Amino acid sequence: MNNALIRIFIGFDPRETIGFHVLSQSIHSRCSQPVSITPIALSQLGSLMSRERNSLQSTDFSFSRFLTPYLCNYDGWAIFMDCDMLVLEDIKHLWDLKDDKFAVQVVKHDHKPTEKKKFLDQTQSQYEKKNWSSVILFNCKKCKNLTPNYVNTASGLDLHRFRWLDNEDLIGDIPHKWNHLANYDEKVPSSQIANIHYTSGGPYFDDYINTDYADEWKEEQKKMLRCDQLTKKR
C-alpha cells in the first residue's frame, strides 16, 4: 500500500448527496498530500450489505461504515467520516495521528442529546459511545473481526460501541477538534475547529439552514460550485 495516499471513506446517503460533495471539497481544497475519497454507498455494495434497514437507522451508512477495513483488504489505515461534516484543516494532520498500538482512534464524546427527533424527523437515539463512530481512524489489520457477515448480523449497539474489539484498550483518542458537534459542543471560533459535525442536521436541510456554523458550510458550497470562464476576444 502507498503510505503517502490518505484513504478516506465517507458515508453516503442519497438524501444528503450535497453533504457528501461539500465535505469532499473541503477535504481536497485543504489537503497537502494525495488523498482518495470513496463513498460508502449501498448502491455500490450489493450483497456485501444485506441486513434489513432498522427503524432506528437514520442514514444508509449507519452500519455499512464498519465495512471500511474489509474494503481495504484489512491492510493499512483508512479514515471513515459521516457525510454531514465540514473539514477546516489539512486532514493530513489527522492522518499523522495514526498509532499502531490501537485498532481504532476516535473522539470519545460524552454525548447525551435531550431531543427525541433530528433531521427528516428521524429518531434521536441515545446509547453509550454515541458519535464515537462518526469519525474513525481505522488500523485495518487490527479490525479483522469486521467481516461482512459480522457487519450484517451484529446488533447496531455492538457495532457502534466497538464490542467487536477484544478490549477497549484498542480504542485510542484523537483531539476533540476533529469531531466538533455543532449545536452541542461549546461554540468556539471556527478557526479552532478541524472538523464540524452537523449531527442534528446539516445546513442543507430547511430546518437547519441557520444551525451553528451554517455560514462556513454555505461558503464551502460556493467554492465547490465555482467555475471560472474564459472570455473570448472577438
Image (cartoon, rainbow, N blue to C red):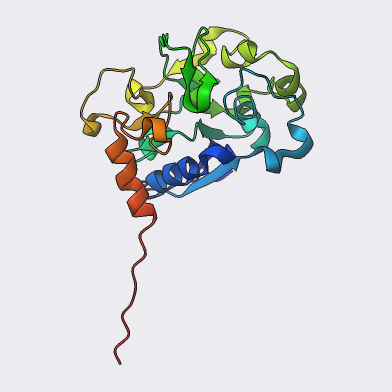
| Residue 38: quadrant of the picture | top right
Which corner quadrant holds the N terminus? top right
Q: Is residue 100 visible?
A: no
Whole-percent x, y for residue 176 in the image: 34, 21
Residue 202: x and y in percent read 41, 33
* Left or right of 166, for residue 99: left
Q: Is residue 50 left or right of residue 56?
A: right
Q: Residue at x 22, y 24 (%)?
A: 188
Residue 133 relative to residue 217: left or right:
right
Examine the image and state in which quarter residue 85 appears. top left
The residue that appears at 64% across and 29% down in the rendered structure is: 64
Residue 31 in the image: x percent, y percent?
A: 37, 46
Residue 95, how many percent across, how many down?
A: 43, 34
Taking the image as drawn, is residue 210 in sight?
yes
The answer to whether residue 174 is left or right of residue 69 is left
| Residue 90 drawn above or below residue 66 | below
Q: Quadrant of the C terminus?
A: bottom left
Q: Is residue 88 above or below residue 102?
A: below
**Residue lying at 37% horizontally and 27% vertically, measured from the top left:** 178
